Amino acid sequence: MELCDILRKNSKIIRVSLVGYGSSASYFHLPALKSIANVELFAAIDPSPQNRNEAIKEGFRNAWDIDNLQNLSSNNTDLVIICSPNIFHYEQVLLLLKKGINVVCEKPLCLNYKDVEILVDVAKSNQLILCPFHNRRFDDEFIKLKEIITKVGKITQIDLSVQKWDLSYQYASENFYPKWRKNKKFGGGMFNDWMPHLIDKLMCIVGFEIPDVINSISIASCWTTDCDDLTSIQYYWREKNLFSRVNISALDYSVNLINRTERVKILGYNGAICINGNDESGEINLFEKDKNPQVFSYSNNPIEIKTFYERIINAITTKKASLQPISFEETLLSYKLMDLTLKKTLTNYG
């Protein structure tokens, strides 16, 4: 039986509220939520009157100013989705968990590992769902990559890359502070914006093992003064003899012209995989020894996030945190690696 059929059979209404109704909420989260039959949109909480009005138009029963976050309780909401700027994640998630409410939080879950540990402990002790929104592992691109990755044999190198021009503040709210991703006081920078996704993918591939060697450099250049717009990282696992490079940049103007970059390169004893494209679509090229190259197209559609939320709702309905799409252990290991990387990072900003 498909998960969607199980949810229909266990047709308990799941009341969902959302904190931070900007572009990320409306583009990624809302289409998936509205496609699930037993979801009720209870409240959208946002400091902008324009955003609150838009939320009502999109089907939320209530729209409140951020000062009314305290109005949420386990009596009116089963799940809260946090889409506020990064600096607010920890305090908002902690407040909601202590109220007995399940939480999905946009990445990064927190800005340091100690806070992640606290939140996971609170969620566990209250038997609640707490899940970072690492939606990129549900992309068509990554699903197809996992289907063919064994064909390259023992993996020797993994390169992951995100290339942009300007920091990706298109998912911030124009009615709040549209360039907050360029500002350290809001938890901005390319590292916080993209590393949770790339580390989640990398850890999925290597089996959630922490590397033995970490080298990293992070700079502020033409877009920022107090957080990064370019980060380059090297990882090495001795026992696996596996090397990885992770590069995140907001300095690639060619993206504006050709709208595609090399996103992934995986090298193995028996072949290689190269992925070229952008966040929406592109090509996966498989090169195997003594075989003709194969090309697979991918198309990343936000509606695919429905699978993520179906699993979240199933975990809430059955009261089994073990069913959530990103486990507590995976969350802890990914953010531990992010924390270790930051500690090993040389920067030219404070």
Image: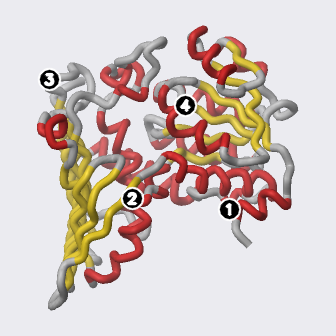
For marks 4 and 2, give the one nearer the viewer: 4
For the residues labelled 3 and 1, the Cα–Cα distance comes to 44 Å
Question: Pointer 3: what residue?
Answer: 222
* Quarter the N terminus occupies: bottom right
Q: Earlier in the sequence, mark 4 or mark 1?
A: 4
**Along the viewing direction, whichever of 19 and 24 lies nearer the viewer:** 24
Q: Residue at x 44, y 65 (%)?
A: 143
Question: Pointer 4: what residue?
Answer: 26
Q: Vertically, is 118 above or below 21?
A: below
| Type of amino acid at the residue the image marks with label 4 | Ser
Q: Is residue 142 visible?
A: yes
Around disc 3, counting alpha carbons within 10 Å, would you say few (fewer than 14), some (14 to 19), or many (20 or more)?
Answer: few
Residue at disc 1, secondary structure:
helix
In the drawing, what numbered circle is on residue 201? 2
Q: Earlier in the sequence, mark 4 or mark 2?
A: 4
For marks 3 and 4, give the one nearer the viewer: 4
For marks 4 and 1, give the one nearer the viewer: 4
In the drawing, what numbered circle is on residue 322? 1
Could you tell me residue 285's position as x and y percent? Answer: 23, 69
